[in-house]
């Protein structure tokens, strides 16, 4: 049982060995305990083909402040990271077989840079797309949903319902057109104007009618 020293450090004569060269078709370093590689400047692990760095029960990669933590069972988390930036030169794909959640204690922005490309949400599959919260979620509603564009188009293969607990307003600075191809009904829960889709108009439930 012995310590084997190769080379000199500055505790020996005040200087280091200039280099230690290991040259072979294969170099294997095996230890029954810990393995430590330390340097006072840059430490590089370089491979001309594939690089594989793994820990059976876990692995940690980063700096003295933030690290990626691999738990040995496939889960990855971060510790101490202050920011995280991804800027690939080509496609970035995030696909999860389970739930995918993006949360922030500050603002969440999607498409906030000045790039004239489309943003697609839920363009394939049969799914419900929810935007905002209602009082079934946490007892309160989202404060507002703002839609701003030169044109806004809402198309549905079935019914379209707009519901509010107070006033619902449809306002146009120029012409307002509200039509139903096979008919239309306008009024309140008591009386309505009924358009039959062929040009005929009747009323249902009106108590009085005043023109001034």
Image: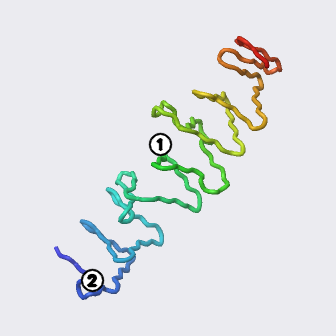
Disc 1 element: loop
In this view, 85 is above or below 181: below
Residue marked by disc 2: 9
Pick the residue in front: 23 or 33. 33
In percent of width and height, residue 208 lies at: 73, 12
- How many residues crowd mark 2 within 10 Å: few (<14), some (14–19), many (20+)? few
Quadrant location of the N terminus in the rendered image: bottom left
Task: Please indicate whether residue 49 sits to the left or right of residue 3 in the image.
Answer: right
In this view, 38 is above or below 191: below
In this view, 156 is above or below 30: above
Quadrant location of the C terminus in the rendered image: top right
Residue depicted at 71% across the width and 45% down the height: 150
- How many residues crowd mark 1 within 10 Å: few (<14), some (14–19), many (20+)? few
Task: Please indicate whether residue 32 sits to the left or right of residue 154 in the image.
Answer: left
Residue depicted at 67% across the width and 54% down the height: 116
Give the mark, 1 or 2, whose residue is nearer the N terminus: 2
Residue depicted at 37% across the width and 77% down the height: 41
In this view, 73 is above or below 1: above
In percent of width and height, residue 94 lies at: 52, 51
In percent of width and height, residue 26 lies at: 37, 74
Residue marked by disc 1: 99
In which quarter of the view is residue 83 placed?
bottom left
Pick the residue in front: 142 or 28. 142
Task: Please indicate whether residue 83 sits to the left or right of residue 183 in the image.
Answer: left
In which quarter of the view is residue 14 placed?
bottom left
Disc 1 versus disc 2: distance between alpha carbons?
53 Å
């Amino acid at each position: 049982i012995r310590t084997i020293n190769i080379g000199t450090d500055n505790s020996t004569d005040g200087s280091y060995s200039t280099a230690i060269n290991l040259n072979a078709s294969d170099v294997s370093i095996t230890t029954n305990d810990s393995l430590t590689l330390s340097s006072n400047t840059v430490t590089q692990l370089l491979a001309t083909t594939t690089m594989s760095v793994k820990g059976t029960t876990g692995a940690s990669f980063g700096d003295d402040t933030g690290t990626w933590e691999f738990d040995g069972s496939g889960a990855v988390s971060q510790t101490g990271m202050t920011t995280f930036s991804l800027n690939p030169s080509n496609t970035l794909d995030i696909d999860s077989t389970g739930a995918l959640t993006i949360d922030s204690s500050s603002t969440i922005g999607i498409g906030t840079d000045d790039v004239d490309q489309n943003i697609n949400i839920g363009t394939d599959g049969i799914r419900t797309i929810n935007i905002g919260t209602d009082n079934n979620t946490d007892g309160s509603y989202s404060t507002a949903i703002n839609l701003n564009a030169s044109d806004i188009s809402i198309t549905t293969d079935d019914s379209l319902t707009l519901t509010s607990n107070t006033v619902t307003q449809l306002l146009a600075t120029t012409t307002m057109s509200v039509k139903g191809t096979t008919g239309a009904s306008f009024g309140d829960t008591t009386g309505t104007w009924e358009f039959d889709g062929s040009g005929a108009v009747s009323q249902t439930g009106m108590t009085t009618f005043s023109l001034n």
